[in-house]
Amino acid sequence: MIDKKDIKSMTYDQVVSEMEEMGEKKFRANQIYDWMHVKLARNFEEMTNLSAALREKLAEKYEYTNLKALQVQESKIDGTKKFLFELSDGNVVESVWMKYKHGNSVCISSQVGCRMGCKFCASTLDGLERNLKASEMLDQIYAITRITGERVSNVVVMGTGEPMDNYDNLLIFIELLTNDKGLNISQRNVTVSTCGIVPGIRKLAEEKLQITLALSLHSVTDEKRRQLMPIANKYSIAQLMEACAYYYEQTGRRLTFEYSLVGGVNDTNEDAEGLSRLAGPLNCHVNLIPVNPIKERDYVQSEAGRIQAFKNKLEKNKINCTIRREMGRDIDGACGQLRRRHMEQ
Ligand code: SAH
C-alpha cells in the first residue's frame, strides 16, 4: 500500500493544485482548507458543503489526521488542563492548555519521545519514537480548541521533543498556524524552545520569522552543561551565544533563556553571576524554572530562598527575569510524565 498524502500538512497553494489536478474548482480548495484549519473538522464527512461523492474521493486519496483524547486532567488550582492524545498509529503525545489573563496558551509536543537525553527530563527516557507531522502538531491545538470551546492565542513548542530535530515539519506547522486563511495566530505569539542546536538556530534566524526563540540554557559553563545536557558536547556555550546574537540580529526578536534551577547543581551565586555575564550583552529575558523532579532521577528543586536569591542577583545585574509560575502543579509534574505513566501501564 502506498502512503496517502497528508492533506492537513499541505499549504494552501498545495491544496489548490491538488484540487486542480482532481479537476475540481479552486473554490473547493478554499472550502476544504477552511474546514481543516478554521472549522476544525475531524474528518471529510463533516465537510457538509462538499458533495458526498467528493468527500468519498478525498477520503480515498488523502490521509486526514485526527487525535483521540485519551485523558484530560484539570488543575483545581489554576484551571490548567493536560491532555493525553492518541495518534492514528497508536502512539501518544501530551499537550497542555493554560489560561492566562492575556489569553489561552497551548504547549505542544513536536516529537513522539526525544533523543536529546537531557538528564532531568522525563520525555527523553525512552528515546525518540518518531517525528510529528505538521498536521499532528496542529491537531493538538485544534483538538484543544474544540474541547475547551475557547480560542487559543499563544502557542509554545515546549512539550515533548526537540523542535530543531524536526525542522522541516516545524516550519510547515508555523506557516499553517499563522496563515491568515487558518487560525491566523500571530507569529509574535508563537515560541519555539530548543536545547541548543546551533545550525538550527542559525537556519531559523534566516527565515526571518517574528516568533520567539527560547534557549534551554540551564548552565553557564560547558562542563556543567555537559553533565545535564548531552547536546552540550556538540556545541559550546560560546557558539550558542553567537547563534543567539545572530537570531536577534536577523529578526529583531528578544530571546528567552530558560534556566531550570536544580538544587545544589546550578543555583549558586556564582552561577547567577555567570548567567548575568552571558545574558547581559544580549537582548533577552531569563525564565527561571524550579526543576520538576522526576522519579527516575534524583534531582531536587532549589529551596525557595535560594531561588529568590538567584533572581535578586540577576536583577541586581540588570537582567530581566521572572520565576516561572508552576501551572497545574496538582495534575502532574514535568513534561512527559503523563505519557510515560500511560506507557508504563
Ligand atoms: N527540546 C526543547 C523543548 C522541550 S523541553 C528544549 O530543550 O528546549 C521544554 C523545557 O522544559 C526545556 O527548557 C527543558 O529543559 C525543560 N524541562 C524538561 N524537563 C524539565 C524538568 N523536569 N524540570 C524543569 N524543566 C524541565
Image: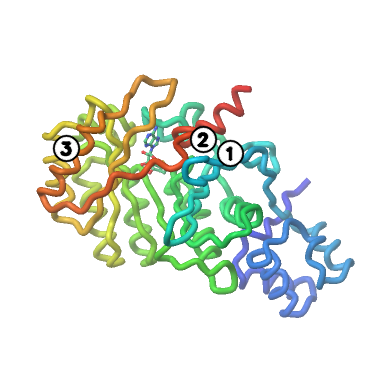
Pointer 2 with pointer 1, Cβ within 8 A: yes
The furthest residue to the right: 53
Residue 277: percent from the left, percent from the top? 12, 46
Disc 2, ligand 1: is the CB inside 8 Å?
no
Residue 76: percent from the left, percent from the top? 52, 40
Identify the amino acid type marked 1.
Gln
The answer for how far apart the CA atoms under marks 3 and 2 are is: 28 Å
In the visual, does 204 lie left or right of 275?
right
User: Could you tell me which residue is drawn at 59 percent across and 42 percent down?
Assistant: 83
In the visual, does 153 lie left or right of 232?
right
Q: In this rendering, is residue 145 above or below 231?
A: below
Residue that numbered label 2 is attached to:
331
What is the number of callouts on the image? 3
Point out the tag, 2 or 1, that comes first from the N-terminus: 1
Tell me how the rendering is colored: rainbow
Q: Quadrant of residue 181?
A: bottom right
Residue that numbered label 3 is attached to:
309
| Front-lying residue, 289 or 198 | 289
Residue 224: percent from the left, percent from the top? 22, 30
Secondary structure under tag 3 reads helix
Point out the tag, 1 or 3, that comes first from the N-terminus: 1
The answer for how far apart the CA atoms under marks 1 and 3 are is: 34 Å
Q: Residues within 10 Å of mark 3 (few under 14, many from 20)?
A: some
Point out the tag, 3 or 2, that comes first from the N-terminus: 3
The answer for how far apart the CA atoms under marks 2 and 1 are is: 6 Å
Residue that numbered label 1 is attached to:
73
